[in-house]
Image: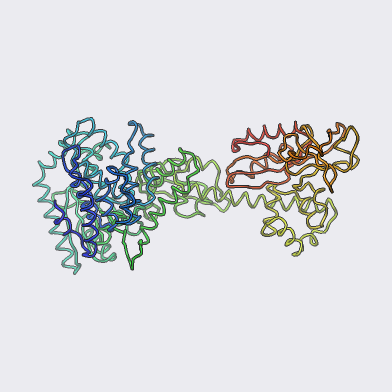
């Protein structure tokens, strides 16, 4: 193919100048360089762009396809490419360059999963994947000159990494050809054997297809339906897959297949009804992907009927628009340029957002968890199961009745108490299989179990279960907080009605930055604040006596003097806010102008420059005081209530918890001395959710 023939395929004349400009730029910089098979690199670039045009992608993708190897040859061209073709093009080809350097490190499943994860993770623009798939398809078409070992390695990576991505993007034309090529290189004898069997029966099969096409055409014409019909023989790889799964050649229903195209969705149902009126449908082979589309947007009606020669014929009925999506996937929905701005059709936008949200939402999660999420929700094999009414539900392989229940409705999952699969009672954690019919039993008293999180396959079910317990925990914390508040009010013989007046609630909210009474109870129930402290805010008491977060000594007995100066008890002392020493720390005293003697830890940086004001201070061994101190640690924000509860359950006096930055917390506690503080830090470090616990 030359550039002129290629440009004839461009539908919009306004796009031709920039595409031609990109070709000429690529030709100039590829400079007659050759690929390993001897072909010119510019011809490969043109072939990739030709595949992309066949997918109906936008101009930016075609331009990036032509230029996708340029920066690998000269990375100094990035600014020039940006100036000539725009930032989108540059970003796409930079991403293509990055993922082209990736390869499987070995043949293990974990290596394939990891490569899928990284490849998707690096593609924040899904058009990068379009180019990668087109690039690999052309490479696979031109691999005959390579060694058998190299061919098998590339085929293995393609089948395990790129084919699943093409499937989840709904790009079946790309997926089907890649699968056939992979089988051709991996198992040439098997490929050729299946091909030979098909060729041996080709004339017979073609005759059957022709007869069936004419029959269906006659039925539809008589009923005034405008249509187009095509016949095909199933792909070599699809037949191989069925044979691998134990099917015999004669048992493969859909070697013979027809597709009927109509204008309107309603006509799809009319067509299937007319076909069933003449030909007996095979039981359990009807699937309605129009009412319930696949997650990759695929829509069509599928049925299998017994036709001429007693053969089974798979018939797919769809509109022309549905066929465009079925063959080209979400690439066909990348519409572009309305008055110079992008306009992404809604279904495309949703799919791209799925990729982005899964990548961005798991940036901080562990590698294994991220891999599972990507694989389970984007790249997994799928099963198709049914409701008792016959509605189709698409789920990842290995899903359970729990996944099915939450896919139907959140309330169905939350109230689930049992499952009947194919008229048999089964454990709700058992795996489902293709064509299972599932009935979910519910009860008003039913509720999720946290153990379900270990059984479910879909992130949707996990999120719904977590949401249930998050809501329940919140309700429990609010109830506990209310109980603690009322108990403290009774203890202090205070009127609840007066304490909870609107002005008092507003006063607490203003002071603590909480939102409302429920938020106050939540803070109490999760031990962020004590009831004594909240009531002290209302009453306007000295908050230092309420064990609020302050940098003072908290005296249990007013006759105790915690600090000795030159061996004598002293009243005019206070604990320095900057370093918060506790009993047992090495300390120094600094004379202040208006606030007596400030007691610092001896390594406090604020001591510098005050050497002439230092006095000898010691802890009073007979004093029975409490001290405020802070511990800093990292933890998952969702686990902070559990961590706080663990501390309070162990007898630790928690004065408050504050999230300094995302995932970094500061807990303020009251301790008797340094030994108690060190012990608390040690025990806190043993909590599995906590990392890097240390004294502030």
Residue 534 screen position, x and y as percent: 76, 53
Specify the color scheme: rainbow
Residue in the foreground of this view, choosing between 342 and 450 = 342
Residue in the foreground of this view, choosing between 623 and 590 = 590
Residue 367 screen position, x and y as percent: 46, 38
Judge whether residue 585 can be spotted in this image.
yes
Judge whether residue 553 can be spotted in this image.
no
Q: Is residue 588 above or below residue 59?
A: above
Q: Quadrant of residue 250?
A: top left
Residue 3 screen position, x and y as percent: 16, 54
Q: Residue at x 41, y 54 (%)?
A: 353
Residue in the foreground of this view, choosing between 254 and 666 = 666
Asked whether, in this view, residue 673 is left or right of residue 143, the answer is right
Residue 286 screen position, x and y as percent: 29, 53
Asked whether, in this view, residue 28 is left or right of residue 161, the answer is left
How many labels, in total? 0
Asked whether, in this view, residue 334 is left or right of residue 693, the answer is left
Quadrant in which the C terminus appears: top right
Residue in the foreground of this view, choosing between 87 and 633 = 87
Q: Residue at x 28, y 62 (%)?
A: 269
């Amino acid at each position: 193919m030359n550039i002129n023939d290629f440009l004839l395929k461009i539908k919009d004349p306004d796009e031709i100048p920039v595409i031609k400009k990109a070709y000429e730029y690529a030709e100039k910089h590829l400079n007659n360089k050759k690929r390993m098979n001897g072909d010119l690199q510019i011809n490969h670039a043109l072939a990739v762009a030709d595949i992309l045009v066949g997918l109906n992608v936008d101009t930016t993708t075609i331009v990036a396809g032509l230029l996708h190897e340029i920066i690998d040859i000269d990375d100094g061209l990035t600014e020039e490419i940006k100036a000539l073709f725009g930032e989108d093009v540059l970003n796409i080809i930079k991403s293509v360059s990055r993922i082209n350097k990736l390869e499987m490190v070995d043949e293990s499943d974990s290596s394939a999963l990891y490569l899928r994860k990284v490849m998707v993770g690096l593609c924040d623009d899904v058009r990068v994947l379009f180019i990668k798939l087109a690039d690999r398809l052309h490479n696979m078409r031109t691999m005959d000159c390579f060694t058998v070992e190299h061919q098998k390695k590339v085929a293995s990576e393609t089948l395990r990494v790129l084919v699943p991505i093409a499937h989840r993007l709904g790009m079946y034309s790309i997926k089907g050809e890649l699968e056939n090529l992979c089988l051709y290189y991996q198992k040439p004898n098997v490929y050729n054997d299946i091909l030979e069997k098909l060729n041996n029966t080709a004339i017979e099969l073609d005759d059957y297809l022709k007869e069936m096409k004419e029959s269906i055409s006659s039925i539809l014409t008589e009923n005034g339906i405008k249509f187009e019909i095509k016949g095909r023989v199933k792909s070599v790889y699809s037949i191989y897959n069925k044979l691998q799964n134990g099917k015999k050649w004669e048992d493969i229903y859909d070697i013979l297949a027809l597709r009927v195209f109509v204008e309107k969705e309603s006509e799809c149902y009319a067509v299937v009804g007319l076909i069933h009126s003449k030909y007996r449908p095979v039981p359990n082979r009807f699937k309605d992907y129009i009412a319930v589309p696949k997650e990759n947007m695929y829509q069509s009606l599928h049925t299998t009927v017994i036709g001429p020669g007693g053969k089974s014929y798979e018939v797919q009925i769809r509109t022309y628009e549905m066929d465009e999506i079925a063959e080209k996937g979400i690439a066909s929905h990348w519409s572009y340029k309305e008055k110079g701005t992008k306009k992404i059709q809604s279904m495309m936008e949703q799919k791209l957002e799925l990729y982005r949200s899964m990548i961005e939402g798991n940036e901080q999660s562990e590698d294994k968890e991220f891999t599972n999420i990507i694989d389970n929700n984007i790249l997994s094999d799928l099963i198709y199961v049914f409701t008792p009414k016959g509605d189709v539900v698409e789920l990842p392989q290995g899903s359970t009745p729990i996944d099915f229940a939450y896919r139907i409705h959140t309330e169905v999952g939350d109230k689930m108490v049992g499952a009947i699969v194919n008229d048999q009672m089964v454990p709700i954690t058992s795996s489902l299989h293709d064509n299972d019919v599932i009935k979910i039993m519910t009860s008003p008293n039913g509720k999720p179990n946290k153990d379900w999180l270990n059984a479910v396959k879909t992130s949707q079910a996990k999120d719904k279960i977590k949401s249930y317990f998050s809501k329940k925990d919140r309700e429990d914390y609010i109830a506990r907080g209310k109980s603690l508040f009322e108990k403290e009010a009774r203890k202090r013989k205070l009127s609840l009605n007066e304490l909870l007046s609107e002005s008092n609630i507003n006063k607490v909210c203003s002071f603590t930055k909480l939102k409302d009474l429920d938020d106050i109870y939540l803070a109490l129930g999760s031990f962020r604040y004590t009831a004594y402290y909240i009531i002290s805010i209302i009453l306007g008491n000295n908050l230092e006596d309420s064990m609020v977060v302050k940098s003072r000594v908290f005296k249990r007995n007013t006759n105790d003097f915690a600090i000795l100066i030159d061996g004598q008890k002293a009243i005019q002392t206070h604990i320095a806010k900057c370093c918060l020493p506790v009993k047992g720390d090495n300390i120094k005293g600094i004379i202040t102008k208006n606030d007596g003697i400030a007691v610092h830890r001896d390594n406090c940086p604020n001591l510098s420059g005050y050497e002439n004001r230092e006095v000898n201070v010691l802890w009073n061994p007979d004093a029975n005081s409490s001290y405020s101190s802070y511990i800093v640690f990292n933890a998952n924000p969702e686990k902070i209530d559990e961590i706080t509860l663990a501390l309070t359950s162990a007898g630790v006096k928690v004065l408050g918890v504050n999230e300094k930055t995302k995932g970094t917390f500061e807990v303020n506690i009251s301790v008797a001395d340094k030994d108690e503080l060190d012990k608390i830090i040690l025990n806190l470090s043993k909590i599995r959710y906590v990392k890097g616990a240390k004294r502030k």
